[in-house]
Amino acid sequence: MWRFYLTVSRWVLRVASIVFLLSVIDANAEDPPNILLIVSDDQAWTDFGFMGHEVIETPHLDKLASQSATFINGYVPTSLCRASLATILTGQYAHQHKICNNDPPEGVDREKMLPFLQNTETLPRLLQQKGYKSFQTGKFWEGHYSNGGFTHGMTTKGRHGEEGLTIGREGLQPIYNFIEKDRGDSPFFVWYAPFLPHNPHNPPEKYLKKYAVEGRNLKLAKYWAMCEWFDNTCGELLDYLDENNLSENTIVAFVVDNGWIQETGDTKTTRGWFAPKSKLSPYDGGLRTPIMIKWPGRIQPKQYKDLVSSIDLMPTLLSAVGMEAPANRPGINLLSKVQEEKPIERDTLYGELFYHDGRNLQDPASSLTHLWMRQGDWKIIESVGEIPSYELYDLASDPHEEKDLSTTNPEKVAAMSQKLSQWSDWQ
């Protein structure tokens, strides 16, 4: 009899062990993924190795692209940093979240702009509902990091991001401290938006020496060196995830806030040392960006040509943690495309441009300068006014928008402008 009881006891122990192991495996499978969002600052869509640049070296971002769902036809709706960053955080167009300008109207206190983000369901604020701790670094225009819903952060005041702007340029230790100490056992969301390759273009000598060759404009060499410096900081951060066994359960997303084409003349032709068809413009030099999403084991690396936008980041990342985007978010969940191989049912993207300084904070239309729409390979740009004017480009044959085809394609202009007008009925 004792042998019978011994045999039964052994089987009970085996079954209990199996149940315990299965519960551990199931628990691990259900662990919510960490999220790292990398936001480049003032970098053209062309200025990466994986996007075909023949000189700039970005080996770390090239590697990330090879491990990601990489959308080469990504866009931001607005080519101005504050408005663009607010769109990434809210999943809304600028006319919806009302952070359309870098600065308020003359004589209006900057504090008047802060409630727009304070009173909105932002990505970090929503992730808190799932137990996430979040950390803001780098560019953040909205005062204290808590105004954006972050639980932790570097910026507590200022215009661009003040204290947070040291990240990347002076190392990444604040991020490491947050992950290792401040977030405890919670899943994390890290906003890495360094002031790179943004002005001032003052790269370390080791990068500048590589690009400052005879016959090349020094301004251009400095900007290209800044692109590689930024890439190196991304590599350090991604290596840290690998070394600390965090990569397998961390989603890494990448986007650029707006483009930049380096001005190389002796005088400025825009507000800064950037060319007219880049930052603050309705052209792809200011709007287009690669968008990447890496999620090991859940997303197969592949390059996509679908039209996607930074408004898609919020619904995509929320979907990954089992949440839906709030109402009035026009973006789509890209995971359904990359995980289930479903086509993105979208052939058109829209966007809008505003003055750098606002006119009326409560009325986005008061500072609207341009509307734009890309449909397939065709792009239309409307200069807003009592009598609007239009430009039309075939991006398949003219990716840098050098030949305006509006006068030779009046029917296409009419059709596309009507569709653009329907989208912009918020005016």
Image (cartoon, rainbow, N blue to C red):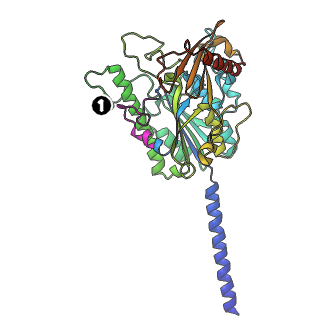
- Identity of the residue drawn at 55% across and 27% down: 377
- Residue 91 place in picture, x, y as percent: 65, 31
Depicted 287 relative to depicted 254: above or below: above
Q: Amino acid at mark 1?
A: Lys
In the image, residue 202 lies in the stretch drawn in magenta: no
Q: Tell which residue pokes out farthest to the left in this image.
A: 214
Question: Label 1: few (<14), some or many (≥20) within 10 Å?
Answer: few
Is residue 268 visible in this depiction of the protein?
yes
Say whether residue 132 is visible. no
Which residue lies at the image location 39% right of the left edge and 40% below the top edge?
Answer: 59
Q: Position of residue 23 (x, y in %)?
A: 65, 64
Task: Report the quarter where the N terminus lies.
Answer: bottom right
Point out the residue furthest to the right here. Answer: 327
Vertical arrangement, residue 408 with respect to residue 285, above or below: above
Q: Is residue 58 magenta?
A: yes
Give the residue pinned by disc 1.
210
| Residue nearest the viewer, comparing 315 with 174 | 315
Residue 333 image offset from top left, x and y in percent: 65, 39
Span colored in magenta: 46-64
